Amino acid sequence: MKLREKFSNEDLDRIKSAVRTAETGISGEIVPVIVARSGYYTIANYKGALLAAFTVFSLIVVFDRYVPTLAVYDPLHIFLLVLLAAVIGGVLPNVSDDVKRWLVSQRHRDHATRQRAENAFLEQEVFNTRHRTGIMIFISFFEHEVIIIGDQGISKVVEQKVWDNLVNDLISYIRKGKTVEGLEVTIKRCGEILKEKGFNKTSDDVNELRDDLRIS
């Protein structure tokens, strides 16, 4: 299923409405972004192929030593069995996200997610506000990670631990299958934080970024 199909039109309207409401009375822009995955992780295919080939070859050695009735002695058969295992192991990560996630280190996933979030910040032009008061709420489904990035005008007065707490709360919603509800709560809280920090709407303030959910 494509990521867009996970959200109904009603879901999209709820998120858009949450952004519009949260931005009422504040000089700031809230941009929710959701991506299916942050990296391609081809290393998982290589790891899967090597692991499967090594496992099959090890079994051939074990059978040769301890279970001779199941042993394979023909070099060509050994080669084909190991090759087949490598092919299956290399393809399996493309079929199962769980397998791919298992084969990719947490550090690698964290790095890819942070890089993708930073790219999204630029792609969605969250920086393109008059007073640099944009906030991006970034969700990467495959990695099960959430990142909130505040632009320069906001990061100067809002501590990182504030965003970390929001991230943890949103992740708890996502794990319960309540992504839309979690986004609504997080968006509302972002608006409250900006108001608490004095980012009040001025008479000449305009909506500089669109309010809808970005999906890719």
Image: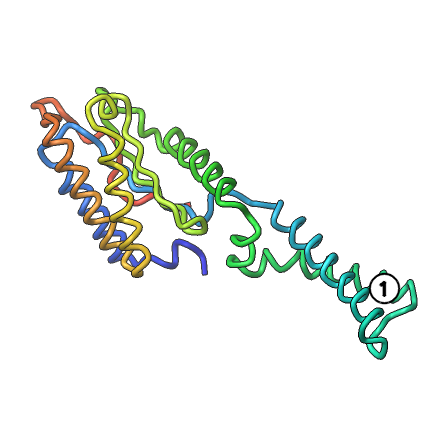
Residue with the most extreme bottom position: 69
Where's the N terminus, which quadrant? bottom left
Choose top left, top right, bottom left or bottom right for residue 58. bottom right
The image shows residue 29, relative to residue 82, as above or below, that is above
Report the residue at 80% width, 73% height from top. Answer: 66
Going by the numbered disc 1, the residue's amino acid type is Ile
Q: Is residue 44 above or below residue 149?
A: below
Residue found at the very far front of the displayed protein: 66
Relative to residue 37, is residue 117 depicted above or below?
above
Check disc 1 and report its element: helix, strand or loop.
helix
Examine the image and state in which quarter residue 52 appears: bottom right
Q: Which residue is mark 1?
A: 78
Describe residue 82's horizontal placement relative to residue 192 as left or right: right
Residue at 23% in and 21% down: 156
Q: Residue at x 23, y 52 (%)?
A: 13
Indicate the colouring scheme. Answer: rainbow
User: At 15% from the left edge and 31% from the top edge, which residue is drawn?
Assistant: 194
Choose between 168 and 212: the one closer to the eye: 168
Give the percent coordinates (x, y) of residue 110.
45, 40
Q: In the rendered image, which quarter contains the C terminus?
A: top left
Closer to us: 2 or 137: 137
**Left or right: 199 in relation to 35:** left
Asked if 205 appears above or below 162 in the picture, the reply is above
Q: Position of residue 9 (x, y in %)?
A: 28, 57
Q: Is residue 22 left or right of residue 216?
A: left
Circle 1 residues within 10 Å: few <14, some 14–19, many ≥20:
some
Q: Position of residue 91 (x, y in %)?
A: 65, 58
The number of callouts visible is: 1
- Horizontal and vertical percent position of residue 16: 22, 46
